[in-house]
Image (spheres, helix red, strand yellow):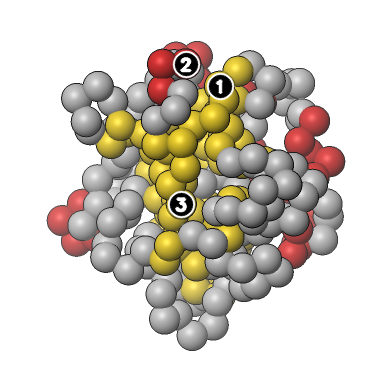
Amino acid sequence: MKFVVFLFLSLLPQLGLAIVDGEAIVDNSFRQSVALVYKKDSTQSSGEIYCSGTLVGSRLVLTAAHCISLGAKAFKVSVEEFKKQTWVYVGETEGADDLPMIVPQFKNNRVIVHPINDSIYADAAIIELTEDVDTAKWGISPAPVLIPTKELIGKELIHVGYGQLINNGVKGNKSLMKLPLQQFNGYNGLGVGEHGVSGPGACHGDSGGSAYMTDNSGSLRFVGIEYGLSSNNCGQTATYFVPLTQKLIEWMKSYSAIF
């Protein structure tokens, strides 16, 4: 897929990325950010949180493509079988008894992975749910999007995902971090944090998670998909995001009129 794939080995604990030194979300905020859950058996009520995503349409979740391909490898099933058994969880996980196991609420209708090529922009996948998310019931609405520009460098980026709060901890903790956008280019995409410097950063459990920034009017918008970090230990490295582009949005629209 791209140079970052070498970071994601076949072992399950190394599959995703999450937020180390992040703040646990307990106030029903950022409900657009959701968890991806794999059920080994469709008859079971619970499954395992393995990645994160963002609700961008009434039944459309955007996540990282490598969550699907490497998730299948980690759970030792075919990609097609893995797609069938992926569900979506909405809500907080603070106080959950059995993380990373959780009971998801939404089944997917289909999963569409972006065409593979040597670009960070290919690390995207659509999960279309079998039903609309009831915004009144769940206190959630799809994330409004913003195509980022270099003018945002220096402004605060908020990253939300389900993962470890400490290095080598337990995945599934919904948390956030806030850092200024350090870089934006065609090689790394959106980047926050610094290599070798301790501080909030991505780790296991949060690949595909949400990046939010404010637009000129002060409204919070979804701007990118978390896809990678360096080989440093969690909490001591930079975190990168696939930025939304018009081409990426058009690709989503070509598969779903719901977006």
Mark 2, residue position = 150
Mark 3, residue position = 177
* Frontmost residue, 33 versus 201: 201
Image x and y of residue 114, in percent: 62, 28
Check disc 2 and give the amino acid type. Lys
Q: Is residue 46 left or right of residue 152?
A: right
For label 2, the SS is: helix
Which quadrant holds the C terminus?
top left
Of the image marks 2 and 3, the number of the one nearer the N terminus: 2
Q: Is residue 200 visible?
A: yes
Quarter holding residue 155 = top left
Which quadrant holds the N terminus?
top right
Image x and y of residue 140, in percent: 25, 52
Check disc 1 and give the amino acid type. Phe
Q: Residue at x 68, y 20 (%)?
A: 187
User: How far, Cα to Cα, is label 2 from label 1?
Assistant: 6 Å
Quarter holding residue 258 = top left
Mark 1, residue position = 184
Check disc 3 and give the amino acid type. Met
- Image height check: is 186 above or below 86? above
